[in-house]
Image: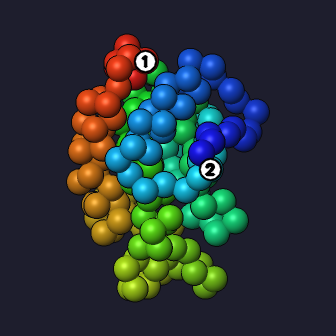
Amino acid sequence: MTVSWCGVLRPVELMTVAVHTVDLARLSLLLPQRIEIEFCSGGEHHYWGATVLDPRWCGRMRLNAGLQPREVPLILAHELMHVHQVHTGELRPVSSGGIMWRGVLYTDTANLPWEQYMQLPWEMEAYEWQEWLLAEILRLSTDKDKIE
């Protein structure tokens, strides 16, 4: 099981926290063997994190390089829930550009306003379970200073 990096931004402190967080999350959540993290600028939407829904990169996510180290575990917990959803086949992109969630096709989700996007079932589930996963990560951590 590995965590690898892509992109040009490599904030060492955030990378250290991310590896520690992913290693602990693996003890509680079914995840692919390889997790790939790209640190990016927040861009025009000022996002915190995003999971790449592309079959070529099952375990890839993007994190905002401007995050504080203490923010990384919660953002990663949310994105790792999406990686888990993709890995288990619950969430997957379809060739038409839509997203399949537990057998139901959703189209044009990229153009939804933020408030409506957050109401999509995979987002609601990720928000519901991220607190549990974060609690598990903190419980399992023997070095809480790295992720608090």
User: In the rendered picture of this protein, how many numbered marks are placed on residues?
Assistant: 2
Q: Percent position (x, y) of residue 83?
A: 48, 57
Residue 4 vs residue 1, the one in the foreground = 1
Mark yes or no: residue 56 visible: yes
Q: In which quarter of the image is the N terminus?
A: top right
Instruction: For marks 1 and 2, give the CA distance.
Output: 22 Å
Point 33% across, 34% down: residue: 137
Instruction: Tell me the element at label 1.
Output: helix
Side of 42 where 30 appears, left or right: left
Look at mark 2 in the image and give the residue it sits on.
34
Residue 28 vs residue 79, the one in the foreground = 28
Q: Residues within 10 Å of mark 1 (few under 14, many from 20)?
A: some
Please say if the residues under marks 1 and 2 sit with CB atoms less than 8 Å apart.
no
Look at mark 1 in the image and give the residue it sits on.
146
Q: Percent position (x, y) of residue 68?
A: 45, 21
Asked if 138 appears above or below 60 in the picture, the reply is: above
Instruction: Tell me the element at label 2.
Output: strand
Q: Quadrant of residue 84?
A: bottom left
Identify the amino acid type marked 2.
Arg
Residue farthest toward the right in the current orientation of the protein: 8
Asked if 119 appears above or below 60 in the picture, the reply is: below
Side of 122 where 7 appears, left or right: right
Q: Percent position (x, y) of residue 57?
A: 66, 60
Mark yes or no: residue 43 visible: no
Point 74% across, 39% down: residue: 7
Q: In which quarter of the image is residue 82?
A: bottom left
Side of 85 where 1 appears, left or right: right
Identify the amino acid type marked 1.
Lys
Residue 60 vs residue 137, the one in the foreground = 137
Q: In which quarter of the image is the C terminus?
A: top left
Q: Which of marks 1 and 2 is nearer the N terminus?
A: 2
